[in-house]
Structure formats: C-alpha cells, structure tokens
C-alpha cells in the first residue's frame, strides 16, 4: 500500500471505529458485530504498525495506555470545581428550596434531578475539539494531570463529534441551533469516573486469584485505578465516565447554552455519555417524587449511586444565587439512607485484636443485605453497646455503612419480649484471662472508650500481629494467612514477627496439612518479604495509629528506619498526616526495649531498612539539601548513629567528597577524604561541632 492510500484508509478506519465506539459505549446500541469490529480494529493496528507516522494521540488504538509516568503534574482548572452540600431528609430539602427561593423571590424555579454517581470527580479540557488535559478535582482549584489515564476510558471522547460535519448519528442535530454546531475553542466538562458493580466484581475476582489486595467498593477501585502512574494498568480497569456539567466554554455564552437540560443534550451530541435519567421538577413535591422514583430505579442501575443531585436548570438563576466557599447555592445532594435490615441477635462474642482491643461482635440470624448474607456485625465498643442498650435476644436493625463492614444501628424496641438478657462485658481478656484496662484521656483520641488486654503475649494479640505483618497490605507474605498463623502460634514455632525469619523446612514439617511444597512456598514468601519497601515494614509492625498512609508519609520523609528512630515528636508532627497522637504513639513504641530488640532481630535477619520512597524534597529540616561525608573514628558517636542523625534532620550522607559536599565530619585517623575536603574548601567539623549543629 502506498503512503497516500494508507493515509486515506487510516482516516476511514478511525472514523468508522470512533462511530462504532460511540454507538457501543455511549449509546449502548452496537451497530456492528463484535468480530467485525475486531477486524476493523486489527486492520487499524496493522496499518499503524506499518506506517507509524499515522499514529495520532487521538487514534482509537491509543486507549491502551501510553508510557508510565513518574508523577502527576499539577493542573489548574479554568473555573473552580466545587463540591455539593448534602441533605438527608425531605425537611432539609424543603429548607434548601426555600433558601434558594428567598435569594430570587420573584422567579419561578425549575429544577433538574440527576443520579449522584458514586465515583471520582474529573475535569476534561478540550481544545479545538481535542481532549488535551484530564484532571482530578484536587483541592478544587488545582488537580492532578491524569490525561493519559482518562484517555484509556472508552467513554472519554478523544475528539468531539463535529456536529456540523457529520450527520451520521440521527436526526437530532437539525434541532440544534446553528450557534451550537461549532465546537468551542476551549471547553471544560465535569463528570464522574466510576466502575460498574459487575466490572468491580470481575476486577476483585481477578485480583483475588492473583493474591492481590481486593478493593473495598467500586469507588475505591476507581480512585485506586486513576492513581496508577502506568496508563497500561488503567487501560485494563473497567472504568467508565459520565459527564454532568460544563465548567467552561468560550464562545458558548449564547442564548442556547443557558439551561442545564440543553447543555446536557448538547454534550450528548458532542459524544459524551450524560446521566442516564434526569427529571424536570417545578416544586418540592415534584422533587420528592423524583427522588423517590430514582431510589427505586437506582437498584437496577449497573453502577452505584449514593444520592440524587438537585440543580437549578437556569444558568441565569445559578449566577444570581452564586456560591459559598465550598459549594454552589443552586444545587444540593440528597443522600439516600444506607440499606438496612432487621434480624435477631442471638449472641455477643468478643474479638481480641492485634492491639489488644476488645471488640464486641454481634452474632446474628443470617440475613440478606445489599448483595450479601450477613451473620456478624460490629458493635464497636462497650460504650456503644450501653448507649444503644443492646441485649442478647433483641431484634436489631443492621446497616451496611459505606458498603463494607456491617454494623448494628439499634434495637427494634417494639419487638422486645422481656426475655432478652443484658450482656456482661468481660473483666478479663477472654483469650488469655489477663487483666484488661480501659484507655482513657484525650491522648488516645478516638480509642478513648476501648478496653484492651494488657498482656502483650496474649495469643490473640500475637496472632493478630503476625496476620497483620503477613497481610497483603503490609509485608505481603504469600501462604501466611489466618489458618497458618494460628498453627504457628499454637505449636510455639513463632512468637513474634522476627521468629518467622528463622523458620526452616524441618520445623514446618510437623504442622498438620503442611506438605513440602507449601512449606517451600511459604519459606520463599518469607524470604521475598525481606526486600519489601520500608513503609510496608513500618506499617507491618502494627504500631497503634500508624496506618499504611502514615507509614508511606514516614518513608517519604525518612531515608531509613534508623533515621525515623531518632526523630522527635516535633519533627514527626511536621509531617503530612502525622498529628500529636500518632507521633506520641510512634515515639513510645520505639522507646520500648522489647520493640528495639525486635527491630535488631529483624535487622539481623536481613530485612530491608532503607526507604526507596525517600524524597529529599519532603525531608524538611535544618539539614535539608545538605550533603555530609563522614571520615575517621568519632570519639562518641558510632558512624551509623551519626548518619541517622544527619538523615533525620533532612540531610544526605555521601561516601566521597566533592564540590557538592557541604560538610565533612572528621574523627581520628581521617585520611584522604579530609585532605580532599581541605583542598576543596569544604567546611570541616569535629564531633562536638557537629552535635552543636544538630542542636544538641
Ligand atoms: S454536580 C458544582 N452532578 O458528587 C456542582 N455532581 O458530592 C458540581 N457527582 O464532586 C457537582 N454525580 O463528583 C453533580 N450528577 C451529578 C453528580 C455529581 C456525582 C459528584 C461530584 C461532586 C460530588 C459532590
């Protein structure tokens, strides 16, 4: 094929595929058989392979994802992306409508109601009809540039349908005023990226098979996917996009874009998927009707909705009512109550967690709720139990909060018979019979009402700590699940996480149902865990209040575990996500002899203690940006301690002296490095001067 012909055929294929994509993904009305589509697509791929010059960023083949990024660049939205205020009852909704009416007393209000899709808000910028930037909401003004990730979504048009030129999709175009048939030079549209329930279930099933961590709900899966730096991974996630508004459009300030309903029809004609159902309402009664209808319908939607969004239709009135700092005054979200069910509570058991916390658990008559059968639910803590006066034998209302852990909301008092028994909260740990203590005082924040088992060697705590260490979110040791951990503890093969690293084939051979192959796999998994990132180790230690997010912040701020160990509460609280409670808990943990010994044993076992996430920019501190070289023997400090001090204060330790060296710390018998430092005029310090510089 000649280049000219190839170019012609390429344009044809692109146009056809784009039209089929639109019909399939946006309209959900395929216009061609799958095989036929695949044939066209393959032809396009082959053609682009032979003539790479034909590949354009907006070619349908480019949805598979471009090259991985190292970071997301910040991008400023052309107009702020605001959030919505919430209402939870019809009364609150009435109040909202009255509030708006008072702002524009003489106007007849017309509302639009749309499903509130539960996903992640995004902004898409089109320049001359081509998608140029896609971003997250961020702080509302500036978001992350996730263009490459958004391009992988089939319903995110790379190029808008040119209304004037193409009449391929029906007749509606003729009813569009001529002014709208040209695409604005620059426009931004706002919408929600989401995952269908089916797509989410498929993704989680695949991840489970690969022993990867599953996502808690479709929204988390969406957010997690959009955060990927490799668009190739995002391309494989079942993401979808719905556009519900216009953020900016230049040259579109004409009469025809003055109502939300016409904007939505226009956006649809440009190729966007818009809300699948909308309502026009002219009174509170009509609004309530629409909200109730949506509540019925949404069960059947393929994706999750957590409410209805109510917005004024007229742009002129929107302008008159304006915004608060956070949200528009002309729109509100109506949140539906979480799904609930009633069932009988036939017992309360106590679970002892890895931190020793005693959590009461409701044992329930199995009941079907929001997609699964529930037989247990959390009762949180003793205070909660008393406040709700929950008794064994009660009929209780349970709820799936945030679609994850079911909780008991309260007692159905009308169904009390008098035969119910109050629950006696145990005064000793049900697992090891040790004393329990109630954490009090503001220092422990939210856990102020928690009873904890005081015995650090309590088997339940030991198991909990081991399970946590081995879990996918922490050190990710394959084959070390709940059952195995229980066996290891029961047979006294392991008492703490460091013991895992001295397990051998012989010792494992004695366990029930443990073949040689699984034993070898387990040992390989344990071996592999030695190389894990530092944040996983920090998180895996199970320090009270130190979650994965905090662990990551710490690993960004400190280059090594040793540097972290030397940090003070003041230094820690300067870190993102780290407040006083967390800092104190961390410092307490590190100060305990027992924990220090554990760390030393882990070090001796060969675990990684250095952070690959370390970001010197985030290492705020007096030594930030400064490079040190250590040479000779210092009188008091060990070399590692000195290095840790430097790193804790934000500095870097280097092995050789150069122009870039800021300080050389010289001890006795310092040799050539000291020489070189003198030659280059680098500041030379002795130990005392160094300690002074450290502020000690
Ligand atoms: S309008 C300035 N419409 O809900 C008004 N938002 O809780 C902007 N959302 O950040 C929002 N579906 O991510 C609007 N049909 C819809 C929506 C919707 C979902 C999300 C959106 C927003 C959040 C506010």
Image (cartoon, grey):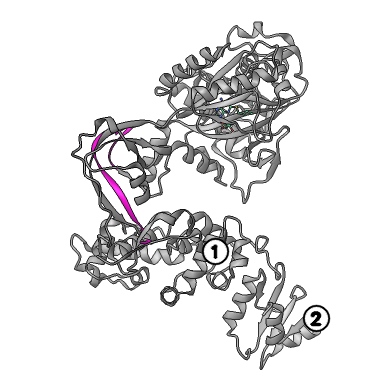
Q: Specify the quadrant that holds the C terminus.
A: bottom right
Q: Magenta region: which residues?
A: 355-376
Q: Where is residue 199 shown, x and y percent of the image?
A: 42, 33
Residue lying furthest bottom:
669
Q: Name the mark on residue 680.
A: 2
Give the number of the disc on residue 583.
1
State the image coordinates of residue 91 (x, y, percent, origin top left).
51, 23
Residue 613 in sight from this viewpoint: no
Residue sitting nearer the eye, 472 or 448: 448
How many numbered dots are placed on residues in this image?
2
Q: Is residue 493 magenta?
A: no
Q: Secondary structure at mark 2?
A: helix
Q: Residue furthest front?
A: 418
Secondary structure beneath label 1? helix
Q: Nearer the viewer, residue 122 or 305?
A: 305
Alpha carbons under labels 2 and 1: distance apart: 41 Å
Q: Is residue 302 left or right of residue 657?
A: left
Q: Residue at x 54, y 37 (%)?
A: 64
How would you classify the magenta stretch by its main secondary structure?
strand
Q: Name which residue lies at 61% across and 77% down.
A: 643
Q: Which mark is residue 573?
A: none
Q: Quadrant of residue 178?
A: top right
């Amino acid at each position: 094929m000649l280049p000219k012909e190839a170019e012609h055929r390429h344009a044809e294929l692109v146009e056809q595929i784009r039209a089929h994509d639109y019909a399939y993904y946006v309209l959900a009305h395929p216009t061609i058989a799958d095989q036929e589509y695949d044939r066209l697509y393959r032809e396009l791929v082959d053609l682009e392979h032979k003539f790479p010059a034909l590949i354009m960023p907006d070619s349908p083949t480019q949805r598979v994802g471009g090259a991985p990024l190292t970071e997301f660049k910040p991008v400023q939205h052309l107009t702020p992306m605001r959030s919505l205020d919430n209402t939870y009852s019809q009364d609150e909704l009435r109040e909202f409508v009255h509030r708006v009416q008072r702002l524009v007393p003489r106007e007849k209000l017309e509302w639009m109601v749309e499903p509130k899709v539960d996903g992640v808000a995004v902004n898409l910028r089109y320049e001359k009809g081509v998608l140029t930037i896609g971003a997250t909401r961020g702080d509302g003004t500036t978001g992350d540039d996730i263009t490459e990730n958004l391009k992988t979504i089939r319903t995110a048009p790379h190029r808008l349908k040119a209304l004037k030129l193409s009449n391929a999709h029906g007749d509606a175009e003729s009813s569009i005023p001529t002014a709208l048939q040209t695409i604005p030079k620059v426009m931004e549209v706002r919408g929600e990226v989401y995952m269908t329930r089916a797509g989410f279930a498929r993704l989680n099933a695949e991840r489970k098979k690969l022993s990867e961590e599953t996502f808690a709900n479709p929204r988390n899966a969406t957010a997690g996917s959009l955060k990927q730096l490799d668009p190739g991974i995002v391309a494989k996630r079942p993401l979808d996009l719905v556009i519900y508004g216009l953020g900016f459009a230049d040259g579109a300030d004409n009469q025809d874009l003055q109502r939300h309903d016409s904007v939505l029809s226009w956006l649809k004609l440009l190729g966007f998927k818009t809300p699948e159902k909308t309502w026009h309402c002219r009174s509170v009664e009509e609004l309530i009707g629409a909200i109730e209808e949506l509540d019925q319908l949404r069960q059947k939607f393929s994706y999750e909705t957590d409410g209805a969004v109510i917005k004024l239709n007229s742009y002129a009135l929107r302008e008159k009512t304006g915004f608060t700092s956070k949200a528009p005054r002309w729109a509100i979200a109506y949140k539906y109550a979480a799904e609930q069910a009633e069932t009988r509570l036939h017992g309360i058991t106590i679970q002892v967690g890895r931190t020793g916390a005693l959590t009461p658990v409701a044992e329930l008559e199995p009941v079907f709720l929001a997609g699964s059968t529930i037989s247990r639910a959390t009762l949180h803590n003793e205070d909660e139990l008393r406040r709700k006066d929950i008794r064994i034998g009660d009929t209780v209302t349970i709820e799936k909060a945030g679609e994850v852990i079911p909780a008991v909301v309260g007692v159905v008092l009308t169904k009390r018979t008098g035969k119910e028994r109050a629950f006696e909260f145990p005064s000793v740990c049900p697992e090891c019979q040790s004393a329990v203590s109630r954490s009090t005082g503001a220092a422990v924040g939210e856990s102020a009402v928690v009873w904890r088992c005081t015995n650090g060697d309590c088997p339940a705590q030991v198991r909990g700590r081991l399970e946590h260490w081995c879990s996918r979110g922490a050190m990710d040791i394959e084959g070390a699940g709940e059952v195995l951990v229980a066996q290891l503890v029961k047979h006294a093969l392991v008492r703490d996480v460091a013991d895992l690293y001295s397990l051998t084939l012989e010792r494992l051979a004695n366990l029930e149902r443990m073949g040689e192959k699984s034993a070898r796999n387990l040992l390989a998994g344990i071996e592999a865990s030695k190389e894990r990132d530092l944040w996983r180790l920090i998180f895996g230690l199970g320090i009270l209040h130190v979650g994965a997010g905090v662990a990551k912040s710490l690993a960004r701020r400190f280059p090594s575990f040793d540097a972290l160990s030397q940090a003070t509460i003041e230094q820690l609280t300067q870190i993102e996500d780290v407040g006083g409670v967390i800092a104190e808990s961390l410092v307490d943990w590190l100060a305990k002899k027992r924990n220090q010994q554990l760390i030393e044993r882990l070090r001796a076992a060969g675990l990684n203690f250095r952070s690959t996430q370390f970001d010197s920019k985030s290492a705020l501190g007096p030594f930030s940006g400064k490079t040190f070289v250590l040479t000779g023997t210092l009188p008091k400090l060990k070399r590692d301690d000195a290095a840790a001090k430097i790193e804790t204060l934000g500095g870097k330790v280097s092995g050789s002296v150069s122009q870039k060296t800021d300080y050389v710390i010289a001890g006795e018998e310092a040799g050539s490095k000291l020489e070189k430092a003198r030659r280059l005029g680098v500041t030379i310090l002795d130990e005392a001067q160094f300690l002074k510089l450290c502020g000690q």
